[in-house]
Every structure is written in C-alpha cells, then in structure tokens.
Amino acid sequence: MVQAKPLKISDIIRFLEAKGAKARCVACGSKHFETVDECEPDARVAFKAFKFPGYDATGAKAIDVVLLVCGNCAAIRAYARKPIVDWAAENPTN
C-alpha cells in the first residue's frame, strides 16, 4: 500500500476556493479552521459506509475524509479526501 502524503490545511482551503465553496464556517462565519494533523501517527479519519439491509461493520466500505473544525465555534465539516489530494497534486503551490 502506498503511503499518502499528509494533506495541508492550505491545500484544503485552496481546493474549496477553487471550487467556489465558501472557506467560512457555515455556523458562525469564521475563517479560522483547524484540521486533524495528518503528520501525527494514526491521525487519519474515515467514515464507514454500510450496505442496507443491516449494519455489518466487517463488510463496510471506508470513505477517507478530512475534517475541518471551526476555530471559533467548533462546528465540524467533512470532505472526501481523495478529490482534494488529486486536485492539490494537479495544482501545486509555487
């Protein structure tokens, strides 16, 4: 398995702005965000997607996500990680 590089918050914000998404908290309007520090061991986040009927966790698909946490009101926004990683690789900073 290829080890993914840690995703920087600056790349997340650049992605959101490039896609026309507001880089502001939807709850309070703050522009200050924090994210899980992906440089820390075991710091990645994934959601489990269960097939219906039932909730068999052993067969659930994992969706790799990045969480943005508002630095003001602590509201959490989740985004699929792969499209951001792919976009950042295609649009590097100078």
Image (tube, rainbow, N blue to C red):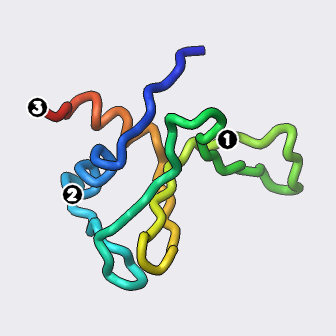
Furthest residue toward left: 94
**Residue at 60% of width from left, 14% of height from top?**
1
Identify which amino acid the numbered label 3 is placed on: Asn
Identify which amino acid the numbered label 1 is placed on: Ala
**Callout 2 secondary element:** helix
Q: Residues within 10 Å of mark 1 (few under 14, many from 20)?
A: few
Location of residue 57 in the rendering, given as x and y in whole percent from the top left corner: 85, 46
**Residue at 50% of width from left, 74% of height from top?**
75
Identify which amino acid the numbered label 2 is placed on: Glu
User: CB under 8 Å between callouts 2 and 1?
Assistant: no
Location of residue 53 in the rendering, given as x and y in whole percent from the top left corner: 85, 56
**Callout 1 secondary element:** strand
**Residue at 77% of width from left, 50% of height from top?**
51
Q: Is residue 58 above or below residue 53?
A: above
Q: Using the numbered discs, state the Cα–Cα distance from disc 2 to disc 1 in whole angstroms.
A: 26 Å
Given residues 57 and 12, the one toward you in this image is: 12
Label ID, residue 94: 3
Which of the two discs, 3 and 1, labels the residue nearer the N terminus?
A: 1
Label ID, residue 17: 2
Label ID, residue 62: 1
